[in-house]
């Protein structure tokens, strides 16, 4: 199992960028994790690009977040950018 914890950037389809802290895990061909996002906009597009500090990118889908929490679930698509 591969894992990445650290800074990342979420990029919406409109090109807006948000700095986040992620905790990601990969098992075989699937990967997922969480992102800590201050002031998360629940209306943000759910399909976004995740960019790691070294420039590697992958497509992700944002999951649900509790109204009181700044942690949101995410599910990766394709190969993990940290493996």
Image: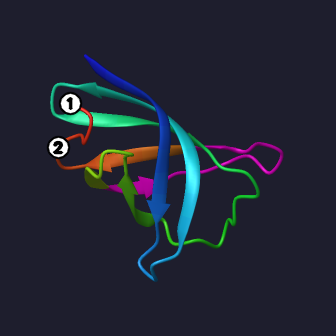
Disc 2 packing (10 Å; few <14; some 14–19; many ≥20): some
**Residue 70 is a magenta residue:** yes
Q: Is mark 1 on a helix, strand or loop?
A: loop
What residue is shown at x 31% (from left), y 45% (from top)? 54
Disc 2 from disc 1: Cα separation: 8 Å
The front one of 67 and 7 is 7
Q: Quadrant of the N terminus?
A: top left
What residue is shown at x 41% (from left), y 56% (from top)? 61
Total marks drawn? 2
Q: Where is residue 66 in the image (x, y as percent from the top left)?
A: 74, 46
Q: Position of residue 38 (x, y in %)?
A: 73, 51
Confirm or deny contact between disc 2 and disc 1 (CB under 8 A).
Answer: yes
Q: Is residue 66 above or below residue 24?
A: below
- Please state if 20 lies on the left or on the right of 61 as rendered: right
Which range is magenta? Answer: 59-72
Q: In this view, does 30 lie above or below 64?
A: above
What residue is shown at x 23% (from left), y 40% (from top)? 80
Q: What element carries label 2?
A: loop
Disc 1 packing (10 Å; few <14; some 14–19; many ≥20): few
Q: In which quarter of the image is the C terminus?
A: top left
Q: Mark 1 points at which residue?
A: 83
Which numbered circle lies on residue 79? 2
Q: Where is residue 35 in the image (x, y as percent from the top left)?
A: 55, 42
**Residue 32 is a magenta residue:** no
């Amino acid at each position: 199992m591969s894992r990445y914890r650290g800074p990342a950037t979420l990029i919406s389809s409109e090109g807006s960028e948000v700095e986040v802290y992620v905790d990601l895990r990969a098992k075989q061909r699937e990967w997922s994790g969480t992102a800590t996002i201050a002031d998360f906009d629940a209306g943000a597009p759910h399909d976004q690009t995740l960019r790691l500090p070294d420039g590697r990118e992958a497509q992700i889908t944002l999951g649900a977040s509790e109204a009181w929490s700044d942690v949101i679930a995410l599910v990766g698509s394709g190969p993990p950018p940290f493996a």
